[in-house]
Amino acid sequence: PPRGLPAQIARAAVEPPRPLGGIGLGLPYTGPQGEPIFGLTPEQRLNQNNASLARHLEPDLPPPVAKQKRKWWVIYAAVAAAAIAIGVIIALLTVPPDDGGPDSSTVGGRALKAFESKNEAEAVKILDDNATKVDKDAFAQLVIGHLAANNNDVTRACKAYVNALALDASVETNQRMIQNLKSWAVSDNPAIVAQGFDVWIRTADPEAKTALMNALVFEKKARRHAVREVVLRHQVAGGNWVASYTLDLEQEPSCPARKAAIAKLRSFDDKRAIPALQRAIVKKGARGTPKGLYNWCVIDDLKAAVAYLQQVRTKP
């Protein structure tokens, strides 16, 4: 036997493997690890003996197995599991914290809780007892707005809402505030309409812009005029200014007011104003008006505006 090897392993190197089965049992002869050897060629048996010897010399190695192609779904499942795990980790890292509204330990948080519990007296007391803090507290300003709204003090309510939005943009989703602003935006009082829209357009409510654009071309002149400054102040794009001032041209009772509308229509450099200006040139007025034309006092302005706009290049 080779020197330096344990006797069992040494014998395995020189002795042929003993059969563990036989033809009489209906089983093939097998090697030391149960591998079939009956019917193998001498070279095949030698290869199996060498493999067995290697396993004895390196017992930690697993027995050889036939290589199999991994099923595609096994690979897919492994990749999917990894992706899910990564997704969960990313989600945990990116989910914003749930602040649950204002901190109930702050002045604004306590005042808002009292107000929402329909305890307005308690809300007022909290605000009064902490007068030096409410100016810097967004939710305290929000409660001031709610209290003023309940007392029909639109100006004070809007001022408080603007302060709240400036201090903390998260209050822009407050539904009580938005409902108050919506109610003021449909008021018959032009001043209240302007105040309501001025704050409403600052919130996250997607309906605010649509309502503002509709008001810009509203049939009633007072409502149109009330929102024009709001649109300009907040630089809200998309308004149909030609339609808005065309209504002025048709509705304004005085020559100076119609003259101002014509000047505006001309200033837009928009050819869509030409048909309205041409209609105004031939519009018939009441009996007794000079030449029988409604716009006889601004005829020259109308004709000049039409001539100017006809030569304006259409914007691409």
Image (cartoon, rainbow, N blue to C red):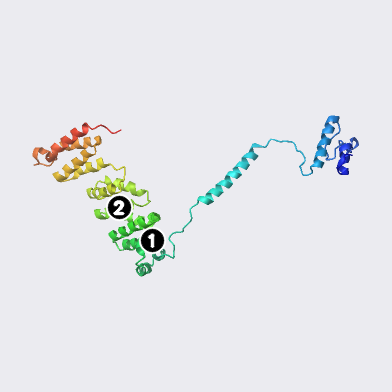
Residue lying at the far front of the rendered structure: 3
x and y percent of residue 28 in the render? 86, 35
Gap in Å between the C-alphas at discs 2 and 1?
20 Å
Q: Nearer the viewer, residue 47 or 143?
A: 47
Q: Is 18 positioned to the left or the right of 282 in the image?
A: right
Q: Is 140 positioned to the left or the right of 18 in the image?
A: left
Q: Residue at x 17, y 38 (%)?
A: 280
x and y percent of residue 111 in the render? 39, 65
Q: Secondary structure at mark 1?
A: helix
Q: Is residue 102 above or below residue 268?
A: below
x and y percent of residue 250 in the render? 19, 42
Residue 20 in view: no
Residue 128 in view: yes
**Looking at the picture, which amino acid does disc 2 mark?**
Asp
Any mark on residue 58, and which? none
Any mark on residue 139, and which? 1
**Looking at the picture, which amino acid does disc 1 mark?**
Phe
Tag 1: Cα neighbours inside 10 Å, few (<14), some, or many (≥20)?
many
Q: Residue at x 33, y 58 (%)?
A: 163
Instruction: Residue under label 2, please give it.
Output: 198
